[in-house]
Amino acid sequence: MNEQLSPRNSQIKSYTVASIAIIVLAILIASNFLTLEVEPGLINLLWGALVIVMITMIIQTFSTERNYAVYLNQLNNNKERLANEIKHRLWAEKTTSENKNRLQIIDENFPVMLAYFNSKQQCCYHNRAYRLWFSLKPEQIDNHFPQQFLSAQFYQGIKDNIDNLLSGEIFISQRIQKLINGSTCLLTEQFIPHFDAKGKVIGFYTLYTPRILKEHELITENPDNNLVEIRSEKSGTEEKLNQNKNSRLSSGMSFSARVLKAINQGEFHLYFQSIISTTHDSNQITFCEILIRMAEEETNLIPPGAFLPLVEKYGLMPQLDRWVVDHITQWLSSYPAKTNTIVCINITKDTLCDPQFIIFIKNQLTTYDIPAKALCFEIEEIDAKSNLSEVTIFTQNIRQIGCHVSLCSFRHDRASFNLLRNLKVDFIKIDGNLICDMIYNEADQTKVSEINRLAHIMKIKTIAELVESQEIAYKLREIGVDFVQGFGIAQPQPLNALKETSD
């Protein structure tokens, strides 16, 4: 009510002041041109009142103009905010529609029965093949626990392995099932944990892959060693599957041996993702981050989110990091643009605490005649915080050699900026959680701008990760961020593709 009355009160005051000015001016004019006997003192008082009234009117005019400018600015801001909200909503609707189409393709065409459960074991996603196999409707599965809709036989596979599954282990098991039409099916079950960006398990996938046996194939179970055997009646040959019927794929020594075998036999695959400069420099460097994938049977590639936490759990990261450095330095030795290249390699906390790793890098650079500036070692901020003294020594030694150092997942908080007082780094990677939504989040945009400003004061170049669209890239260029990286900029490619682009 008061806000509604205040403009009217302001108008009444302005009209009152103007009326007083007119009355005073009329009296002065009348006293000058008409023969009115007015005391000189009163004349002076009227002139003084007129001056005061005129000053008041000027002040009111300026105040009105200022208030109008503020109101106009607020109106423009509201208009811009409304336009951004409309744009954001249209973008969200478009993204939702695209994702819905992709999910529909998976739902209708993916031959594997797929379901996803959160850490509380509630089902959050299931495809069409999954529903058809278990003869269930979506409402019977959505947000339900597996024991509520699965048979005791199928639920037992999840129940027996759930603790280890939520601790980050992968499981594969097999079962024989007779179908209604009389055929025999070998069903392979896979239970795969889902990790968040910090390596914490936040859910798991269940995949069931059926294989209908042909008429001449027979399946038997060996109770002595718990193996499934496939025998062909035509050829008389027999194939024994290597997986134990209910074995853990990644438990203890078996997983350690599997990783060591993969390292020794070169069963890891290296990919690269380009890091692009936001400036148009004629002497542009080739800048990229190395990504690692583990090859499994049937040439499937397991992403790092599935196996790296397990490699770290069993203390195998130093061996894997050395394999990556060895492979990259050998590869760079024949790369024609190695003198104008920066290759980023992620280093884990166990490797950072290994004093022999620096000696290993020196030997690799000497052996393969690689310029030290071609290597940039990326350190996660969380690892730097938890091992500050070791990381400080590592960064000092590695920069003395001539290699670069990048601090990843850098956030806008005091702890992050305090790290830069102890660590000398060449690059910081701004945390992707600040980047991905900055177009629609002014607070995140402000944080990114402040990180970039302070980094440049400290002579540190900035890299924005998780750049998923050109719109975000344009905004980062306006802010002045030096480099951008993400699926909106460049997709990961096999390492050999980098050499092909330079030929």
Image (cartoon, rainbow, N blue to C red):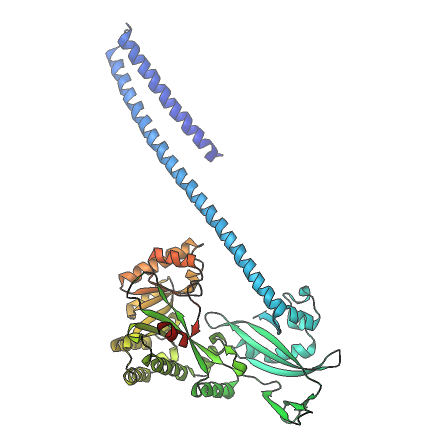
Q: Quadrant of the C terminus?
A: bottom left
Specify whether 252 is left or right of 401: right
The residue under the point 31% across, 28% down is 58
Residue 388: where, in percent of width, then height?
33, 74
Q: Is residue 284 visible?
A: yes
**Vertical order, 289 against 247 (above or below):** above
Left or right: 243 as drawn, with respect to 482: right
Q: Residue at x 49, y 81 (%)?
A: 295
Residue 318 position, x and y percent, is: 39, 83
In the rendered image, the vertical position of residue 372 relative to residue 252, given as above or below: above
Question: In which quadrant of the rendered view does residue 394 lie?
Answer: bottom left
Q: Nearer the viewer, residue 228 or 454?
A: 228
The residue depicted at 55 percent of the width and 84 percent of the height is 249
In the depicted view, which residue is nearer to us: 452 or 97? 97
User: Foreground residue, 238 or 192?
Assistant: 238
Within the image, what quadrant is residue 126 found in?
Answer: bottom right
